[in-house]
Image (cartoon, coloured by chain):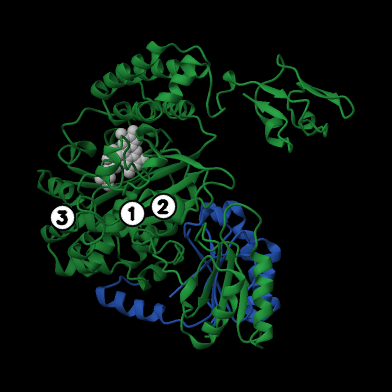
Amino acid sequence: MAKTVFIKDTAITGKDRTRDFYGLFLGVLREKGLDTTIQLVRLADMGIYSAGIAVRVLPDNHLYTQVGESDIAGIVESIKTGQPYQPRLTKQASTQMRIVLRNCGVIDPEKIEDYIAHDGYHALARCLTELTPEQVIQEMKTSGLRGRGGAGFPTGMKWEFTRKSAGDQRYIICNGDEGDPGAYMDRSVLEGDPHSVIEGMAIGGYAIGASKGFFYIRAEYPLAIERIEKAIKQCHDNGLLGSNILGSQFSFDVEIRLGAGAFVCGEETALLASIEGKRGYPSPRPPFPSVKGLWGKPTCINNVETLANIPVILFKGGEWFSKIGTETSKGTKVFAVTGKVKRSGLVEVPMGTTIEDIVYGISGGAMSGKSVKAIQTGGPSGGVIPKDYFQTRVDYESLQKMGSIMGSGGMIVMDEDDCMIDIAKFYLGFCVDESCGKCAPCRIGGTQMLRLLEKISEGRGVPKDLEQLAMISRAMQKASLCGLGQTAPNPVLSTLNYYRAEYDAHVNDKKCPACKCSKLLSFLIRQDKCVKCGMCFKACPVGAISGNREKGYVIDQEKCIRCGQCFEVCKPAAVLRQ
Amino acid sequence: MAKLTKNDLHSLKAKYAASEKNWIKVGFSTCGIAAGAQKVYDVLCDEARKNNAEIEIKKCGCVGMCSAEPLVEVNVKGLPRVFYGKVDRETAIEIMEKHVCGNLLVNDRIYDVKVN
Ligand SMILES: Cc1cc2nc3c(=O)[nH]c(=O)nc-3n(C[C@H](O)[C@H](O)[C@H](O)COP(=O)(O)O)c2cc1C
């Protein structure tokens, strides 16, 4: 392979120097007569950040960072010899690891041949021909896999409980409801690798003794549904679902049920009610679904990502899987990194990776010019983790200790412009909207808390409100019927814990330090700084700015809706926000 | 198709894994489609025909770089495997003319490089 040299300025601030450096590098190559044999390419993104100018040489796979002009000659020399140029050589620790997403973006999700060519259905074949259901369960227990739907319950144990429950019929259900705002890992797996989830379900069905499985997918995921439908049909055509799968004694089939988009229907007991055609109300546990589930029969409910892990575990062995991750949390976790982050998208890392590696290393940190303030994991059931704690290694226990949860994998990055009261209000508002209303603590408690937060963010809060918030939180945690109400106060409690000063500023000083809560803000044009360009005048959506290019501009406080548009567009920073 | 057995799986795997052809993959999950993957795919197919290019153009799921969709992965023998991001009509044409037919990678459009 001919040599290729990739160049990118990875600095986040300042002018992009990629082009200038490219010119210099090309000059040296020309000088040495190498410009026709070595291909020089400018990248749009290199996947590393804040490392100055970075140069990667392929196929040698040498990576150099903080490269200066004086290094060019040395690097060019090293390309000729194939020996690395030591002064700027950087080891790139590859932090991503793909188990769940192994086929996403690799295979054509609508072609079963492609899946089979990537070891698809080999694990199912191994189970059906070489292992008893008990041995499959044992393998799962060895692997240490825990549920990825949020609670983190060991999958092998769940399977064992379901298998041991008496019943003439058992069911396995794939939970594809994925209601967390900002999370879309499951959608991506269903869309990008539908067969892996079907294979995981079939293996689960074999292990627990179920002949029937259900996909519960939210109706807002039309493409995921379409791809699963196609995949199921392909399985029928090829004898991978139906009777006597792969010529064995095992018969198993799956059907799809659509969720109508209620967050609570992701909760397992509400999900069961929904599949049965009833209103999606949760019910008290015990009895657990593994004992009394769908239509009263033993039922195992697993998350999409959990199921996508199964074929790999049974193909490579539980032992192999258990070597990845931390003491208590094995394998990898997929995160949907979104929000104020440079490179949003899906990230799969081994358990135990630091938050810092995920947010800065892989996702590139904040958008230009801002700094990251915190992340939110676990969606409306989770909490915030401030930047000071980004050395934390993600696993189920460590996140819980921080007052958040692993959740299903949403990771929302917030920057200095985000107000923590506003964030808490958003999540609580979500839970109030989504509360099914069956139990009083969630229905009434949530609404009361939301009112208090609104009061605080509008500058009408009093110190007692904060105590009240904590008190109602405790009541909801203790007395709510299902996980929705029990965890709904988490965002409030965690922001209160880490950002008490911000709450105090709202309550005592009637100020929003992040300048987000519009009722506590005012905008003013500083005449000494104003250049009379008229940008604010054009930007104002409600005509609250009057004046002209001679006299300058003023904001009518009565008309102003405090949207901040004038502040954003003002080049000389003459709009004062306070 | 006939019902598969365990042995069929192995032979199918061998059969499909063997292809040596150059290929392009376009991300066709919700994120890619929303960003315009279908148009990019159509342009690539058109351009391949126009240029008589020996290349297989395939669809795939989301690799995870959702912010850079539409994403196009290109594998041409003798060149590194790369991901072009935020691909529009012009870039798609460039990919076909320069990269696939001319063995030259396109500047300023690559968002990731497959190493190893
Ligand atoms: C309000 C609420 C919403 C939930 N939503 C989901 C969901 O969207 N997807 C999911 O897999 N699990 C969800 N769960 C967790 C499920 O109840 C259940 O624990 C999970 O599906 C079990 O699968 P696992 O063991 O593979 O994690 C939710 C729980 C609660 C309390």
Q: Residue at the spot x=37%, y=31% of the render?
A: A498
Label 1: which residue? A353
Q: Residue at the spot x=57%, y=81% of the render?
A: A76
Q: Quadrant of ligand 1?
A: top left
If you read the primary sequence from the N terminus, does the residue marked by circle 2 or circle 3 appear first? 3
Q: Is residue A571 above or below residue B75?
A: above
Residue A232 occupies which quadrant of the picture?
bottom left
Amino acid under disc 3: Lys
At label 3, counting other C-alpha atoms closer than 10 Å, the crowd grade (few under 14, some 14-19, many 20 or more) is many
The chain that hosts pointer 2 is A
Q: Are marks 2 and 1 in contact (CB under 8 Å)?
A: yes
- Residue B115 at x, y = what percent? 46, 73
Q: Is residue A486 left or right of residue A504?
A: left
Q: Residue at the spot x=71%, y=65% of the render?
A: B90
- Residue A329 at x, y = what percent? 24, 51
| Mark pair 2, 1: CA separation | 7 Å
Label 2: which residue? A358
Q: Is residue A10 left or right of residue A101?
A: right
Question: Callout 3: helix, strand or loop?
Answer: helix
If you read the primary sequence from the N terminus, does the residue marked by circle 3 or circle 1 appear first? 3
Report the chain shown in green: A
At label 2, counting other C-alpha atoms closer than 10 Å, the crowd grade (few under 14, some 14-19, many 20 or more) is many
Q: Is residue A387 above or below residue A317?
A: above
Label 3: which residue? A141
Question: Callout 1: helix, strand or loop?
Answer: loop
Amino acid under disc 1: Thr
Asked whether residue A275 is in view, the answer is: no
Report the chain shown in blue: B
